[in-house]
Image (spheres, helix red, strand yellow):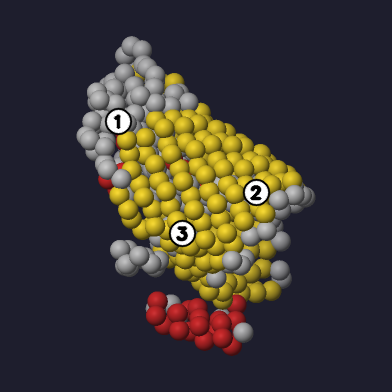
Amino acid sequence: MKIKNQLLALAMAGIFGVPALVHAADNVQIYGTLNLNVQNTGRSGATAAGTAGLATLAAAATGANVTTRNAMSTDSSNIGFRGTEDLGGGLKATFQIESSVGLDGQNATSLLASRNSKVGLAGAYGEVFFGNWDTPYKAVAYGTKVNDPFNNTDVFGFQSIMSSPGFKQRSGGYLSGTNNAAFDSRAANSVAYWSPKFDGFGVKFAYSANEGKTATLDPNLWSLAANYDNGPLSALYAYERRNDAFGLTLMQAVSTGTSSRDQAHRLGLGYILGTTTVGALWERLDFANAGRLAGVTSYKRDAWQLALSHNMGPHAFKLRYNQAQDGACGNVVGNCSTKGLGAKQWTLGYGYAFSKRSEAFLYYTKLANRESASYTLGVAGNADVTTGNYGVGSDPTALGLGLRHTF
């Protein structure tokens, strides 16, 4: 098996032009996730006359709803190389190069290291690494009893409400100098520290460098997470702050202002009893701009989630409910209204495990916006359905049948 892995590593390194991987092939693991589903997505029920909700928000588009359509989603399919080198004295060099895989043929030019990739040093007191990596805020629930039972991805992931303020904002990559409004990001140019677990406690910290700094702006990101995992119990807290990311600017068609401070808090608790796992998550997003000439200067909203998964042999049954409140806002002049900016989401799923690495699944989700809200399916999905010219108050749905294999 070791010789087979060495030959495979040599072949893949040659294909991807990474000769450095060959030198320590016995320490390299080639891994991946191949995850495809055929899905039907659609949207219905747009408000006839789109209302602003926030007092000075530009009127929302009121285009016709997109009819339902079929598509195929690669659902975060990836391939990667990771490994270590023993440096002596309990110290190891660590690395990972992970890339997207366009199994559907539509995204066949996926870039090398487009997903979580790093180089670092690890020892008894944890790991320090540099690279392009999920922020601690995003990663805080990974591997815990609070984790999203729908794998944190595709149109069925919890990012449709958790991490998004609405206003058609979706999670994605963070890059200094580029405006961002949705959290749950993979941050470029990151310096990170992940601690080991001490009696179930662990912490994560990351800073994304201010490469986009100008004479007047200093865009950067700070993210931290604390976890407790012991036996059947998981508890977590995460915080992230983005300076000069101007989330409100993306949510409104008005002036940017001189600076911004966008923050997110997340609390979670999960418990497993036998073959049933129950998790609860609460989140607050808080956006604030200074020096605005017009429009809303602040907006914050709370959201929460309940999730349940139950296994019966190879069968897995999954349920999740999310809800975002209307929130509260501040205006440059006068009062500000957030009436009708909330949303709800129901997600149901069934999975059948052929083995530990191969599963077939059937998922369904429906997101119900209030009359002024425009939350959308958070990851992947057809662009016309997720980010197109649709009115506020419309409700997207998705049904998917897929196969997932890990190696």
- Give the percent coordinates (x, y) of residue 151: 53, 52
Most foreground residue, 20 or 108:
108
Rendered-image quadrant of the C terminus: bottom right
Task: State left or right for residue 399 relative to residue 282.
Answer: left
Determine if residue 298 is in view: no
Q: Is residue 335 above or below residue 385?
A: above
Left or right: 384 as drawn, with respect to 266: left
Whether 208 is drawn above or below 265: the answer is below
Q: Are marks 1 and 3 in contact (CB under 8 Å)?
A: no
Residue count near mark 1 (Cα–Cα under 10 Å), binned few <14, some 14–19, many ≥20: many
Q: Amino acid at mark 2?
A: His
What residue lies at 41% left-to-right and 82% top-to-bottom?
A: 14
Label 3 residue SS: strand
Residue 313 position in % (x across, y down): 68, 58
- Which residue ends up furthest to the top in the rendered image? 334
Q: Residue at x 38, y 53 (%)?
A: 39
Disc 2 to disc 1: CB gap under 8 Å: no
Residue 321 visible to the viewer: yes
Question: What residue is disc 1 on?
Answer: 46
Q: Residue at x 53, y 48 (%)?
A: 349
**What is the secondary structure assignment of the residue under circle 2?**
strand
Sequence order check: which comes first, mark 1 or mark 3?
Answer: 1
Whole-angstrom CA distance, mark 3 to mark 2, is 19 Å
- Left or right: 73 with respect to 351? left
Task: Residue at 30%, 30% (x, y): give it.
Answer: 46
**Earlier-in-chain disc, 2 versus 1:** 1
Q: State the SS at label 1.
A: loop
Residue identified by numbered label 3: 402
Expressed as whole percent of the image width and height from the top left, the position of residue 172 reads: 40, 49
Q: Residues within 10 Å of mark 2 (few under 14, many from 20)?
A: some
Q: Amino acid type of disc 1?
A: Ala
Which numbered dot is residue 310? 2
